[in-house]
Image (tube, rainbow, N blue to C red):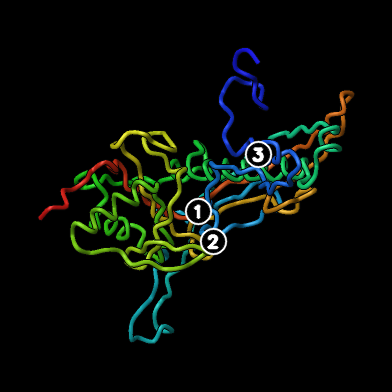
Amino acid sequence: MAGNPTNLFGSDRPEPLYHARALGPDAAYQLADITKTRAQFGSLSPRWPAKFLEFKALPTSVYRINRVNEDAGHPDTLCGKDDPLGNEVPQGFVPYQTTPREQRLSCISTIINVDTRVQDGWSAPYDQTAEQIALAIESLKERQEAQLINNPEYGLLNSLADGMSIPTRTGPPTPDDLDDLLSMVWKEPSFFLAHPRALSAFERECTRRGVPPETADTRGGRFLLWRGVPIVPTDKLYVDGEQRPRSAGDKTNILLVRTGESRRGVVGLYQAGVPDEQSRGLSLRFRGIDDHGVSSYLLNLYCAVAVLADDALACLSDVDVGVYHDPRP
């Protein structure tokens, strides 16, 4: 035969020896059953902040935060050894703020479209519609976490009271900086909130001082503790506005939160009893099938966060996450 014969794969490339003597893997693959996974959503996070916050269900979409008008002073009291019947008891009342803040729920929405022919013909072993809806729900919950921290109206970073934000002492987050935060939210602090890179920067400073933080298992995860308060990681507390910063430096913030309505802390809010509820404040509604055979689903997630008292939330700002130390003595 003149020239180079074409091998079994239709190319001039020399055929591997095992192909000539036995069934090759490329051909065998066509007859084999393969193990496949569900679609892996690599950008999903554990969403720890939602697990540490206490949430309150609202019958309506408005949450009014009533407060005492402390600038008006406290009622006078009678205190002493004398018989109160022989003295005039001071009179008064506790004044309320006449224009309390009202927090309204926001709605995070998306629409998922699935061709019914795809659903009919390609739903083994995984239901295509169910997978699309599950991934959309995860995406909405990721967006919810970002809104709880960064929303311009109700996000934690934009709900700080005057005087409740302080800069770092020297740039990187040190034990002294976190102690300063604890002195501001000293009534039953619940957790710190930090970007993973800020958490690593704090560990480096602790290692440099020879005071490594303790760890504890809680809420389904293992967390660093400082003074017994867990440090909760989240990539939604951005570094210079980026969720996944590429540079070695840059600045971020660390928050300290007291959570719970009974403790006059920070409270997550959601709409109770929404139709077709899938999870907390999340509804899924079938919108129908159009003339092209595409089925449509609407997902709405109602959420917000409220700060009940000024001293329930504090921020360490200008946190430098790019400071490293020479390990040599």
Q: Is residue 275 above or below residue 110?
A: below
Quadrant where the image shows the N terminus? top right
Q: Is residue 243 above or below residue 97?
A: above
Residue 81 picture location, percent across and down: 33, 86
Mark 3 or 2: in front is: 3
Mark 1 or 3: in front is: 3
Q: Is residue 182 left or right of residue 6?
A: left
Please give the label number shown on residue 49. Answer: 1
Discs 1, 3 touching: Cβ within 8 Å = no
Quadrant where the image shows the C terminus? bottom left
The amino acid pointed to by label 3 is: Gly
The amino acid pointed to by label 1 is: Pro
Residue position for label 2? 261
Asked whether residue 92 is in view, the answer is yes
User: Which residue sits furthest front?
Assistant: 1
User: Which residue sits furthest top?
Assistant: 2
Query: Foreground: 261 or 146?
Result: 146
Residue position for label 3? 24
Query: Foreground: 311 or 297?
Result: 297
Residue 196 picture location, percent across and down: 39, 48
Mark 1 or 2: in front is: 1
* Real-space Cα separation, disc 1 to disc 3, in angstroms: 51 Å
The amino acid pointed to by label 2 is: Glu
Discs 3, 2 touching: Cβ within 8 Å = no
* Label 3 or label 2, whichever comes before in sequence order: 3
* Real-space Cα separation, disc 1 to disc 2, in angstroms: 16 Å
* Real-space Cα separation, disc 3 to disc 2, in angstroms: 66 Å
User: Which residue sits furthest right?
Assistant: 291
